[in-house]
Image (spheres, helix red, strand yellow):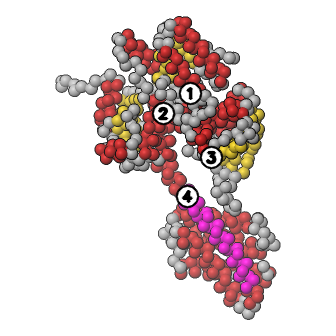
């Protein structure tokens, strides 16, 4: 880029920053409730300085250069931060595009007389900021994905509590949809608990599973098979009438699996299998 | 080492597998075990695999074979102590070892054998009903 | 940030093992386990990968009398994984679709080798030419299902 332009931008960086922040405020995308104005200002200043460094460097055309990398890193950080804070994609994109707008305005004012120079500078600036927009888009989505992944992990962790209900009997109430990922977690924690407690009976309660399709049934059958391989028996409880109906309509064979309608009746069966008797005690 | 030791414990045979089984070793075990069963007139065999970190379809087949052949010579086989990761992997692989009895540990395996052989003495016809 | 498409993958380490006899199966299992432990794979993940490797190498010995296994640690889109390539110069497979079906076998095995191994890994590909040989490539990611 022409040194005349880069020098001008460098000298006026404070006013450019002010102008940019003003534009952002006018577009209502500062979102003070998500991010303090000080933080916004600090991030924007960092980004602007990095952009100016790229423009001023000899490596402007070389996108692998250190300057490009550093501006890329900053924009990624900004985007991920915004994704986590809950900014919308539009707000995040507009944030970067607004810098482009501001720079165009500033250059337009100063170099209005020199069309050639203005065109050249605008074109190069566009190129740089467009590539930054793409990076923003990419990292914003990545940031959101991270949030989702973390939540998924948390949910699968809190949603597989294995409870020892009696000596030799563990129960696992499943709440929510059973997908392959969940099944894996459920199976692992159930089997580990069987080993830890030395239990020979495991009750899998599916009252909290909204629907059972052939895939879910397959997952259940797998869990039962794995339990049996370990040397324990598995009872599935909490099968609602409509679920029983679906299972039959889908042609799924659960005849090799012990099933009960309620957790209570499953526990009763477990007592029977363990030769235990539960009686009312005599009142003293 | 080409053989896995087979111990006689009371009226049962106990095999503890502690090394990584390669094919020859597994096949030898199958032959030795069946021979021991008929020689000693044993009614129950316990195979402890708690130290085994991997059972593939070949080893699964050996376990199945041992169970099936023992049954023919009138003995019961119980595989004990399978690790959770091994169990999940076997199921994923498509092997459920349907003909093999299982127990959590050697102690529970002994209990199971006593129970099964006890019911056998009573002449019940339900000896092989646990194949689900 | 640039150039991270879905197919992004680089090899971090690479190793070859020749398989000619039964005992090599144990060596291979140990090497696979080492790599899986090194990248921090869970115990279940390790077990699945080693079992898959065991199935595939057994196939290779049974049908082709041996071959070469390439063990790699690869970096995909932000995750590391173990990639294993089983290459043999055996008779090849005429109908891959059929060979991938549960219970299909030309030997006297259970016919779980290929389809079973596929279920134990995250990525699976097979190419084969009759008379030339077969190559199976599998990947298991560190955090794979």
Q: CA distance from mark 1 to mark 3?
A: 24 Å
**Mark 1, residue position:** B60
Q: Nearer the viewer, mark 3 or mark 2?
A: 3
Image height of A43 relative to A234, above or below: below
Q: Quadrant of the N terminus of chain A?
A: bottom right
Q: Nearer the viewer, mark 4 or mark 2?
A: 2
Asked if marks 1 and 2 fall on the same chain, the answer is no
Determine the residue positioned at 68% across, 71% down. Answer: A131
- Number of the front mark, 4 or 3: 3
Residue B108 rendering spot, x and y as whole percentages? 45, 20
Q: Residue at x 75, y 30 (%)?
A: C20
Give how far apart the Cα atoms at labels 4 and 3 are.
22 Å
Query: Is residue C61 inside the magenta stretch?
Result: no
The residue pinned by badge 4 equals A145
In reply to whether residue A127 is colored magenta, the answer given is yes
Q: CA distance from mark 1 to mark 2?
A: 14 Å
Q: Residues within 10 Å of mark 1 (few under 14, many from 20)?
A: some
Give the chain letter at badge 3.
C
Answer above or below: position of B121 versus C109. Answer: above
Q: Which residue is mark 3?
A: C123
**Which mark sits nearer the N-terminus, 4 or 2?**
4
The secondary structure type at the circle numbered 1 is helix
Q: Nearer the viewer, residue C40 or C88?
A: C88
Which chain is home to disc 1? Answer: B
B71 is higher (above) or lower (below) than A67: above
Please indicate whether residue A258 sits to the left or right of residue A130 in the image: left
Q: Give the crowd class for mark 4: few <14, some 14-19, many >=20 residues within 10 Å.
A: some
Report the side of C116 relative to A241 (left or right): right
């Amino acid at each position: 880029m022409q040194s005349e332009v880069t020098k001008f931008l460098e000298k006026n960086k404070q006013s450019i920053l002010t102008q940019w922040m003003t534009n952002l405020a006018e577009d209502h995308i500062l979102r003070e409730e998500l991010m303090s104005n000080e933080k916004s200002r600090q991030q924007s200043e960092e980004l602007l300085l990095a952009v100016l460094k790229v423009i001023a460097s000899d490596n402007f055309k070389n996108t692998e250069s250190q300057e490009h990398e550093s501006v890329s890193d900053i924009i990624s950080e900004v985007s991920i931060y915004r994704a986590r804070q809950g900014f919308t994609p539009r707000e995040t994109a507009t944030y970067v595009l607004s810098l482009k707008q501001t720079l165009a305005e500033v250059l337009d004012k100063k170099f209005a007389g020199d069309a050639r120079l203005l065109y050249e500078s605008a074109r190069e600036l566009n190129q740089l900021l467009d590539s930054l927009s793409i990076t923003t888009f990419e990292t914003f989505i990545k940031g959101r994905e991270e949030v989702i992944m973390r939540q998924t992990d948390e949910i699968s962790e809190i949603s597989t509590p294995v409870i020892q209900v009696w000596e030799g009997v563990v129960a696992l109430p499943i709440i929510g949809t059973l997908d392959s990922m969940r099944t894996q977690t459920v199976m692992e924690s159930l089997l580990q608990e069987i080993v830890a407690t030395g239990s020979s009976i495991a009750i899998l309660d599916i009252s909290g599973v909204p629907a059972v399709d052939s895939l879910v049934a397959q997952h259940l059958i797998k869990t039962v098979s794995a339990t049996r391989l370990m040397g324990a028996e598995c009872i599935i409880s909490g099968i609602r009438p409509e679920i029983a109906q679906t299972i039959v309509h889908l042609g799924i064979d659960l005849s090799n699996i012990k099933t009960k309608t309620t957790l209570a009746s499953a526990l009763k069966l477990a007592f029977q299998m363990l030769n235990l008797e539960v009686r009312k005690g005599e009142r003293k | 080492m080409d053989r896995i030791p087979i111990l006689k414990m009371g009226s049962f045979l106990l095999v503890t597998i502690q090394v990584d089984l390669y094919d020859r070793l597994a096949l030898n075990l199958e032959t030795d075990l069946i021979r021991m069963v008929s020689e000693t007139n044993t009614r129950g065999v316990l195979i402890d695999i708690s130290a085994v970190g991997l059972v593939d379809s070949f080893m699964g087949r050996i376990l199945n074979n041992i169970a099936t052949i023992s049954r023919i010579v009138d003995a019961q086989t119980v595989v004990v102590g399978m690790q959770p990761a091994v169990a999940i992997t076997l199921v994923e692989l498509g092997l459920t070892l349907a003909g093999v009895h299982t127990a959590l540990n050697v102690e529970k395996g002994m209990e199971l054998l006593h129970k099964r052989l006890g019911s056998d003495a009573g002449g019940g016809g339900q000896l092989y009903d646990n194949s689900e | 940030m640039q150039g991270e498409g879905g197919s992004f993958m680089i090899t971090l380490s690479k190793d070859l093992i020749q398989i000619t006899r039964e005992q090599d199966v144990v060596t291979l299992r140990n090497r696979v386990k080492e790599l899986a432990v090194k990248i921090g794979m869970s115990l279940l993940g390790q077990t699945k990968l080693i079992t898959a490797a065991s199935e595939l190498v057994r196939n290779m010995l049974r049908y082709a009398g041996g071959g070469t296994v390439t063990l790699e640690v690869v970096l995909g889109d932000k995750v590391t994984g173990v990639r294993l390539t089983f290459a043999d110069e055996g008779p090849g497979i005429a109908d891959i679709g059929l060979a991938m079906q549960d219970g299909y076998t030309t030997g006297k095995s259970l016919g779980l080798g290929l389809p079973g191994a596929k279920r134990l890994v995250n990525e699976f590909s097979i190419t084969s030419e009759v008379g030339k040989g077969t190559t199976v490539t599998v990947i298991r990611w560190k955090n794979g299902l």
